[in-house]
């Protein structure tokens, strides 16, 4: 079967991929997109019917053998995710079944999609801009509901809209400054009377708001890593289980139970957090445990936040040299086993930044808010996801605006240059002259089929 | 048809600003050159305002001068009032503007042409091009004379299909008093060039004896009187013309009412004129209509020359009927009893779509034929002259079998001009502005020679005298920069204290002199004494212009460095060619408007596409990905030019 596009001069073929995550699941989706999507799908499932209406069909391979049965839905271009004809097969989620269904589609004329190719097509067909395309990847990778909502807002163009709005302000100011340079014989006001400083100030305000929101967006997208460190048997694993809301680490009374790193993804107030439980820090002859301690210390240096636990009932136990070597801005000292301390014991109130009981849950709320505060997370209402590169670009914009304010009107041409550079930096976010490598990276960060 | 006995390497048609530079550049680089003109009396004629330079334009003049062209030299021999525009802004956007005595200017150009070896002048209208095997090999003149040449440069200004409008009356003309070149125009229209019409205008001239100067604001020239040519800065100029003043007046509500009442007799507003005029240099009727809220428009009253009393009222270009012209002029302060010596008029003329040109300014359709000046859709003497120089040079190189040359956008305004024209074309007469040059901080008047003279020397354009002057200046500049770079300022030293006394800026922690000079308002000129006494750097006797250039180099250093990185990045993107046959209509993410623009322009690289007006970042990303999808086998061969627009 021909996979050539008809009626279009661009040779576009039809792509297919399993769209759901690998592994057994109740339902698995295979997606097909391209000019031949409808006939290829029909070859596997029989007649498709009207667009956007789900139908129950048997899926067959080239020999007519039934592979699976499930729902098939078609979307006709341009009203689809990619802007092309798209067909989705919802079958049973077993990996073998899905691979067989995919195989049948490939045999019928489709080609296996490259990573991110569906989104790339959506982008190419003008269904979304670069920031939106990135948001799709974020949506898929979202590890919390808040992150999903934020990615959805970026996808809807919220972030792009705000960047564009800022860019327009910069542009209109540029126009003014350029005019005051090139049309001196005309009666265009010079910089002072044009209130250039005031206008730059207004742009800065909008920029600061966008930077803050974007910083939240980056937190939402990337999350943070949090390491639990401390002497053996102070309750690190208990705290991990408490924060995870389920038994994830083995907890015993035996010091040194945790020997290797235990990584658990959780979310704390909507913020995706990768918690890492570590071996208790102590001198030991046990080779395995020594390696565990080495890894724990390494983890302590790598993590965004370190929870340093001590046992409130034995506050003086354990070594502290490792603690002192850490960057204190990232360390939260947690006194655990509050439930075992007799109320009114005055010695404990000074121990650590927060006192908790991993067993009863006392103080956990305070700990959570302390973590959020430390990383600057505000559980935003209208957040959108953003990336480090967006923050860097906004940082550049801020730098150029700040420099331009330091210049006097005797340097109008330098003000103009700073504004030009600010404009270029904003352009980087929504894709101005995006270098090849960057685009490649953006698209290759997608999972196959998304 | 009889053949002229001698043959030439380069034949230049037209002896205006483009033609004169073209002929000179060809002859300087060793080509036997013939300059053909309708009239030897109007060689170097300034058809519109009597001034050379201005913002963006003086930069071009300096570049022409750096390549040893004649515009700056001629302007200085004719200059009667000089001003530095944007003096209160930074050095990159400062621009020199000289009022020029028309007669002296023509005379200067004529002298310079006649002093040039390898160059002959001949007065005769050209009626046809001689084309053999798809290549231009000569021209035929009105009297049936055939000149043979290896390359032809056409610089016919507004003369092709020229039509002059005064009110609803109109007649064929190339300029007031001169006939158009209609036969040639018809011949050219038969060739595969895209032709369109543009419009420009000129104000009525006024007899100075009928003007009351006592009620006008006087505008004297700047002192010391600047030069436009570096040769004169270096060696001075004997017999410099006497300097005079300009004056300023303005229109008023009464003037505007008269104009509005007469619009039914305006060729612009009745649809008689179809050609597009320049938005930045509108006629007075345009200004009154478009800026209805304004109650006055400024008029600069400029002398036409030292030896006559005619004045050029800059700001009231008009094609209204003559009776309205008299009325409106007399409604203006100081002009109450004015006598008009020549009516204002609008002129419509043919121009060729510059997108049909190579960077060399050779036409794509006809080998050996070069276009320069107003026929490429530009306006202004400076824009014309710059193109003329480039076209003359490349015509000469073509005949010698050498590769064409054009500076890149980061090297010269000339590069910006040509790159804009041949890639974007133009809808209105194209004028240079500093804002067209994204790298303008490096494209200054003061460093035009550093940017271009060495290259000009290599190309054979730059003569011995200029080369000497340049190398001397360069040596002094370099040693100054080195001397300044060697000064460290320690807060506790006498140097720091005396610097603070001289400039009012104290030194709190150790810095180098460059850092100190980068503070706002700082200038070497004011630090001569402390530097001499306490740093062992003697700047006495160094001329002010050079000191200022050192200030500028230091002040801009950080910006220039950053731009260099940007330029480097753009150059890396040169590999990102767009397929010549890319089907823009098939890219559904592009707006209809952008599809049309891109299909028309067919940019060779992504960098060029980015300069198409209205193109969005998203559209560029779209192009990039589409180009990439096509695979390397389909990429355009893009060996001729770099993304910054230059050819080496």
Image (cartoon, rainbow, N blue to C red):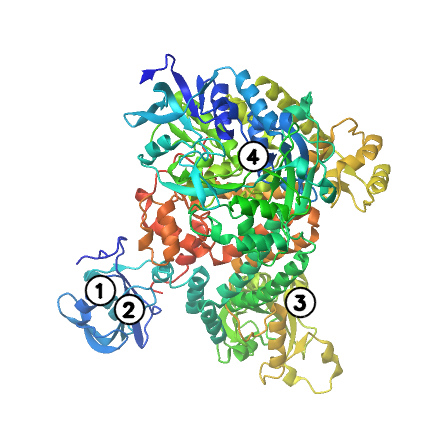
* Cβ atoms at labels 2 and 1 below 8 Å apart: yes
Q: Chain of mark 3?
A: A
Image coordinates of residue B76 in percent, x first then y, are: 64, 27
- Residue located beneath label 4 in the image: B60
Structural distance between the alpha carbons of marks 3 and 2: 55 Å
Is residue A127 depicted above or below B377 in this figure? below
Which of these two is toward me, B223 or B498? B223
Disc 2/disc 4 C-alpha distance (Å): 62 Å
Label 2 crowding class (10 Å Cα cut-off): few <14, some 14-19, many 20+?
A: many
Which one is closest to the eye, mark 2 or mark 4?
Answer: 4
The label number, if any, that marks residue A105 in the structure image: 1
Q: Chain of mark 1?
A: A
Q: Chain of mark 4?
A: B
Residue A55: which quarter of the image? bottom left
The residue to which callout 3 is attached is A319
Residue that appears at 39% across and 55% down: B593
**Is circle 4 on the same chain as circle 3?**
no
Find residue B131 and report its horizontal and vertical position in percent: 31, 25
The residue carrying mark 2 is A30
Query: Does dot 4 land on a helix, a strand or a loop?
Result: helix
Residue furthest bottom in the image: A343
- The foreground one among A114 and B496 is B496
User: SS at mark 2?
Assistant: strand
The quadrant where residue B315 appears: top right
Question: From the viewer's perspective, is the residue at label 1 or at label 3 nearer?
Answer: 1
- Circles 1 and 4, Cβ within 8 Å, touching? The answer is no
Q: Chain of mark 2?
A: A
The answer to whether any part of residue B95 appears in the image is no
10 Å neighbourhood of mark 3: few (<14), some, or many (≥20)?
few
């Amino acid at each position: 079967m021909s996979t050539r596009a008809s009626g279009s001069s661009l040779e576009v073929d039809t792509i297919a991929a399993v769209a759901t995550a690998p592994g057994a699941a109740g339902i698995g989706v295979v997606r097909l997109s391209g000019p031949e999507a409808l006939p290829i799908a029909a070859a596997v499932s029989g007649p498709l019917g009207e667009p956007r209406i789900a139908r129950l069909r048997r899926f067959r391979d080239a020999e007519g053998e039934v592979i699976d049965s499930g729902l098939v839905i078609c979307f006709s271009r341009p009203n689809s995710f990619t802007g092309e004809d798209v067909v989705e097969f919802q079958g049973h989620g077993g990996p073998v079944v899905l691979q067989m269904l995919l195989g049948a589609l490939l045999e019928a004329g489709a080609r296996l999609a490259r990573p991110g190719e569906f989104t790339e097509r959506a982008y190419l067909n003008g269904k979304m801009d670069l920031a939106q395309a990135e948001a799709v990847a974020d949506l898929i990778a979202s590890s919390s509901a808040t992150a999903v909502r934020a990615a959805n807002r970026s996808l809807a163009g919220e972030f792009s809209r705000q960047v564009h709005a800022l860019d327009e302000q910069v542009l209109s100011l540029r126009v003014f400054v350029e005019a005051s340079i090139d049309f001196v014989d005309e009666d265009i006001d010079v910089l002072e009377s044009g209130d250039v400083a005031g206008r730059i100030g207004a742009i800065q305000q909008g920029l600061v708001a966008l930077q803050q929101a974007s910083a939240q967006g980056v937190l939402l997208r990337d999350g943070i890593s949090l390491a639990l460190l401390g002497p053996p048997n102070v309750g690190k694993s208990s705290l991990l289980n408490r924060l995870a809301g389920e038994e994830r680490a083995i907890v015993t009374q035996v010091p040194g139970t945790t020997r290797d790193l235990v990584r658990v993804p959780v979310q704390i107030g909507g913020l995706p957090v990768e918690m890492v439980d570590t071996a208790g820090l102590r001198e030991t002859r046990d080779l395995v445990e020594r390696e565990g301690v080495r890894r724990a210390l390494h983890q302590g240096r790598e993590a965004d936040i370190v929870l340093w636990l001590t046992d409130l009932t034995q506050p003086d136990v354990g070594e502290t040299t490792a603690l002192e070597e850490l960057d204190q801005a990232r360390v939260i000292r947690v006194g655990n086993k509050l439930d075992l301390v007799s109320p009114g014991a005055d010695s404990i109130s000074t121990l650590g930044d927060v006192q908790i009981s991993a067993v009863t849950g006392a103080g956990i709320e305070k700990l959570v808010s302390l973590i959020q505060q430390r990383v600057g997370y505000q559980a935003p209402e209208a957040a959108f996801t953003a990336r480090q590169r967006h923050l860097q670009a906004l940082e550049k914009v801020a730098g150029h605006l700040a420099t331009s304010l330091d210049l006097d009107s005797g340097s109008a041409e330098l003000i103009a240059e700073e504004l030009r550079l600010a404009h270029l930096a904003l352009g980087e976010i929504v894709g101005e002259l995006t270098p090849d490598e960057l685009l490649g990276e953006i698209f290759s960060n997608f999972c196959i089929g998304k | 048809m009889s053949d002229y006995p001698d043959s030439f390497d380069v034949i230049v048609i037209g002896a205006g600003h483009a033609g004169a530079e073209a002929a000179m550049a060809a002859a300087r680089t060793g080509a036997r050159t013939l300059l053909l003109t309708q009239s030897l009396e109007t060689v170097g004629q300034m058809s519109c305002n009597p001034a050379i330079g201005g913002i963006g334009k003086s930069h071009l003049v300096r570049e022409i001068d750096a390549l040893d062209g004649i515009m700056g030299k001629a302007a200085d021999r004719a200059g009667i009032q000089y001003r530095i525009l944007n003096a209160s802004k930074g050095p990159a956007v400062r621009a020199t503007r000289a009022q020029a005595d028309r007669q002296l200017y023509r005379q200067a150009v004529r002298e310079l042409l006649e002093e040039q070896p390898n160059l002959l002048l001949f007065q005769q209208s050209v009626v046809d091009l001689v084309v053999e095997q798809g290549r231009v090999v000569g021209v035929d003149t009105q009297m049936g004379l055939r000149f043979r040449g290896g390359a032809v440069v056409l610089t016919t200004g507004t003369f092709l299909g020229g039509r002059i409008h005064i009110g609803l009356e109109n007649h064929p003309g190339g300029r007031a008093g001169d006939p158009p070149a209609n036969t040639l125009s018809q011949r050219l229209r038969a060739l595969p060039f895209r032709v369109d019409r543009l419009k420009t205008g000129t104000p009525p001239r006024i007899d100075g004896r009928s003007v009351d100067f006592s009620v006008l604001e006087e505008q004297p020239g700047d002192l010391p009187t600047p030069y436009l040519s570096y040769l004169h800065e270096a060696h001075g100029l004997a017999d410099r013309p006497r300097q005079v003043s300009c004056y300023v007046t303005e229109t008023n509500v009464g003037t505007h009412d008269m104009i509005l009442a007469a619009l039914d007799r305006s060729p612009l507003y009745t649809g008689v004129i179809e050609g597009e005029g320049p938005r930045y240099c509108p006629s007075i009727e345009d200004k009154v209509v478009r800026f209805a809220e304004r109650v006055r428009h400024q008029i600069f009253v400029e002398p036409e020359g030292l030896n006559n009393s005619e004045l050029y009222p800059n700001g009231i270009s008009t094609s209204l009927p003559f009776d309205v012209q008299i009325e409106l002029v007399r409604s203006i302060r100081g002009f109450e009893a004015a006598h008009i010596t020549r009516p204002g008029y609008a002129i419509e003329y043919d121009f060729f779509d510059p997108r049909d040109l190579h960077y060399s300014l050779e036409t794509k359709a006809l080998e050996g034929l070069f276009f320069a000046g107003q026929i490429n859709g530009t306006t202004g003497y400076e824009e014309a002259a710059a193109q003329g120089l480039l076209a003359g040079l490349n015509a000469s190189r073509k005949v010698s079998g050498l590769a064409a040359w054009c500076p890149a956008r980061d090297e010269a305004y000339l590069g910006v001009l040509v790159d804009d024209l041949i890639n974007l074309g133009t809808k209105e007469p194209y004028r240079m502005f500093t804002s067209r040059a994204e790298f303008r901080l490096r494209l200054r008047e003061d460093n035009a020679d550093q940017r271009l003279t060495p290259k000009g020397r290599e190309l054979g354009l730059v003569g011995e005298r200029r080369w000497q002057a340049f190398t001397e200046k360069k040596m002094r500049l370099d040693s100054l920069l080195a001397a300044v770079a060697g000064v460290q300022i320690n807060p506790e030293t006498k140097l720091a204290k005396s610097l603070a006394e001289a400039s009012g800026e104290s030194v709190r922690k150790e810095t180098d002199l460059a850092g100190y000079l980068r503070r706002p308002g700082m200038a070497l000129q004011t630090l001569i004494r402390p530097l001499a006494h306490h740093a062992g750097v003697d700047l006495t006797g160094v001329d002010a212009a050079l000191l200022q250039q050192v200030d500028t180099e230091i002040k801009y250093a950080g910006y220039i460095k950053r731009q260099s990185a940007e330029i480097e990045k753009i150059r890396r993107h040169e590999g990102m060619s767009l397929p010549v046959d890319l089907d823009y209509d098939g890219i559904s993410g592009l707006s209809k408007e952008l599809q049309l623009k891109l299909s028309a322009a067919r940019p060779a690289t992504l960098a060029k596409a980015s300069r198409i007006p209205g193109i969005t970042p998203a559209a560029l990303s779209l192009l990039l990905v589409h180009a990439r999808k096509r695979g390397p086998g389909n990429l355009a061969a893009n060996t001729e030019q770099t993304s910054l627009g230059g050819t080496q």
